[in-house]
Amino acid sequence: MSWPLSDADRAFVRGMVIWEDAAVMALAKPPGLSSQGGRIRAATLDDLLGAFERGGGRRPRLVHRLDRDTSGVILAAKTKPAAAFLGRALMDRRVKKTYLAVVSPGAPAPREGRVTIPLRRVSVGREAHMAPCAPHDPDAEAADTGYRTLAAASEAALLELRPHTGRMHQLRAHMAWLERPIAGDSRYGGALTLAGAAIPRLMLHAQAIVFPHPDGGQRRIGAPIPDDMAAVLARLGLPTPAAPLAEA
């Protein structure tokens, strides 16, 4: 059953588009919007893509996901061949993603490095999270995250994160393992207040994505930091990086 779209829904999702051509669409997902359906029935980004439906039920389809409270760039394929091509590129790890995260307390030590601790899924009722584990654990999943400190203050730091694998909650679990959980992440121990004010949501933003294009070459697309994250950075005295320019 498709989600009934109002004129406001259609305008909302069209306003998210930051780049597109005949095969691929890139959108800037706002925080608070689920990529696809979960336990709570509500409009998702996948539902909203129905605003771009053409004849015969042809419509863009998401090729990867972002957590509900993570903002930033996300790709949708506009054709079946493009969806298959991008799906293979993701499996082959030819899609490179860059995230920005506010962590606390302060910068990690060392300020730049790589986390390769394996993760395993832990389910409690209908909820699940990822936990660090030994490589020989039967449920271990290889996980690899690069990180770099961009700026630091006394109680928080702005990090650039580069996932080299795509495990559930990988960035969140690895930052918690570094003892620098992402601000606003109650599941993994992140600070819920900083600089005397509440953190409005998970401070994680998908800043840029580089991907091979079905027609050849590569594309690099960036998404600007949302106002709520920019406000947290300003309150902490940390810079707000500009979104990378799109590159054909």
Image: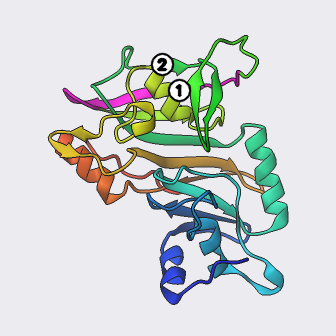
Which kind of residue does numbered mark 2 sit on? Answer: Gly
Q: Is residue 119 in view?
A: yes
Position of residue 110 relative to residue 85, above or below, is above
Residue placed at 39% from the left, 38% from the top? 186
Reading the image, the residue beneath label 1 is 146
Number of disc labels: 2
**Contact flag, marks 1 and 2 (Cβ < 8 Å):** yes
In the rendered image, residue 10, in percent from the top left (x then y), is placed at 54, 82
Q: Nearer the viewer, residue 82 or 42?
A: 42
Residue placed at 79% from the left, 61% from the top? 82
Quadrant containing the C terminus is bottom right
Does residue 145 belong to the magenta stretch?
yes
| Outermost residue toward the front in this view | 125
Q: Quadrant of residue 116?
A: top right
Reading the image, the residue beneath label 2 is 113
Q: Nearer the viewer, residue 172 or 128?
A: 128
Q: Nearer the viewer, residue 247 or 154?
A: 154
Residue placed at 62% from the left, 52% from the top? 65
In the rendered image, residue 96, in percent from the top left (x then y), is placed at 62, 40
Q: Which residues are magenta?
A: 140-156
